[in-house]
Amino acid sequence: MNIFKVLASYSGRVDERNVSAVLAYLLDPTGDHGLGSCFLKKITGLLEREQFMKKYSKNPREYKVEVYGEEPLDTSLTASNKNERRLDVCVWFRDKNGNLEFILGIENKVRIDSMIDKRQIEDEFEGLREKARQDNCQMSLILICPDKSKMVCEIEGRLKEHFNVILWKCIAKKLKDILREESTGEIDPISTELQYLLKSFIVFIENGFESEPQKEKIERQNYGKPVREYIREVADKLEKNKTYELNYVAERVREAIRKAVNKEINEYTLLLQLRCSTVNSKGRRASPINNESKAVDEKFSLFYHPTDKDEEHLIRFDKISCPKNITLWWYGNKTGTSLSEVLSE
């Protein structure tokens, strides 16, 4: 069970406050997660322009870190005339004497369309800068969002110094790095519960913080029908036993959608659905639409990679001609098994 899917099961989407709470929990070095400052250092390591962060990354034990959620900022003097804004997460760095040296503000957006108020980020930046001025310390504001839309680029161009944009896919990568480093002994062991939380969070980030019914509804609205139906139509026209480049298949799907609705498909959505349609894709293994309570319909098990390590090529899948030693991820109610085992049942 993925706790984030539970949170999104009725509304279809996870509330940004839920996501901020998870971020704040993982960023807090004193939290009971057992990561210490590991995740915080992953994030601060992305802020290359901030001199203080270089200092902190080298000697994190020299500083006391405090993490707060819904931090109020006085924005009464900003152009929008709003008296107060609230930052999703605020991280305070104090020296050994308790003096505040740096404030790191984080505003999280799980969807670009949630940025209705164009002045919000700039107000928060100005409010945070004023707070830092009053406390005689440095500051930086991070915007975590799905992609760099035109609006985000415009804001980034105006604020420039001490403003950083981090994409959610980068956050997912840093979380994967933690899991990998734990498995190879580079960091201390983490609990089973935390591993589960991190894996669930990664899956939900990669699915755009949406439940499957909501995602399919959006795809119908945008493209006339779910993307995997276009992929199936393309797959039905491909020769069996012939190897195709992934980019070739992707372009055929793009063309089909352009012809049907005269729109360009979101590239992330396209690649996610291609992975989910490929029986031995590592992406299918972690896909939020593939789980023990909803086995993948066999009609959407469309491709396989020639080998488990070659993810750049696709071959039309069928149980007869497919190599029996490839690893199947979520085929029927089976996962992590070979095709020969499925056929022997």
Image (spheres, helix red, strand yellow):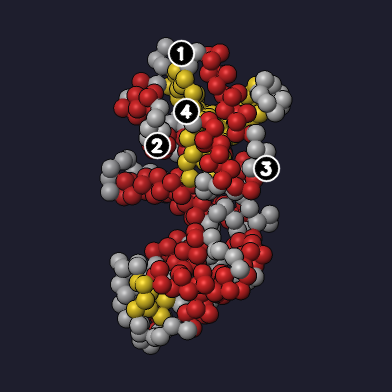
Q: Which residue carries the number 3 mark?
A: 116
Marks 2 and 4, how far apart at CA: 14 Å
Q: Nearer the viewer, residue 189 or 69?
A: 69
Query: How much space separates mark 4 and mark 3, taking CA atoms?
Result: 24 Å
Closest to the camera, between mark 4 and mark 3, is 4
* Numbered mark located on residue 161 in the image: 4
Which element is circle 4 on?
loop
- Quadrant of res 101: top left
Q: Do the residues labelled 1 and 3 touch (CB within 8 Å)?
A: no
Q: Is disc 3 surrounded by few (<14), some (14 to 19) or many (20+) residues within 10 Å?
A: few
Marks 1 and 3, how far apart at CA? 37 Å
Q: What residue type is labelled 1?
A: Asn
Q: Distance between the residues labelled 2 and 3?
A: 27 Å
**Depth order, front residue of 138/195:** 138
* Residue 31 seen in the figure: no
Marks 1 and 2, how far apart in space? 24 Å
The residue where tag 2 is placed is 46
Compare marks 4 and 3 and give the one earlier in the sequence: 3
Instruction: State the CA–CA distance, disc 4 to disc 1.
Output: 23 Å
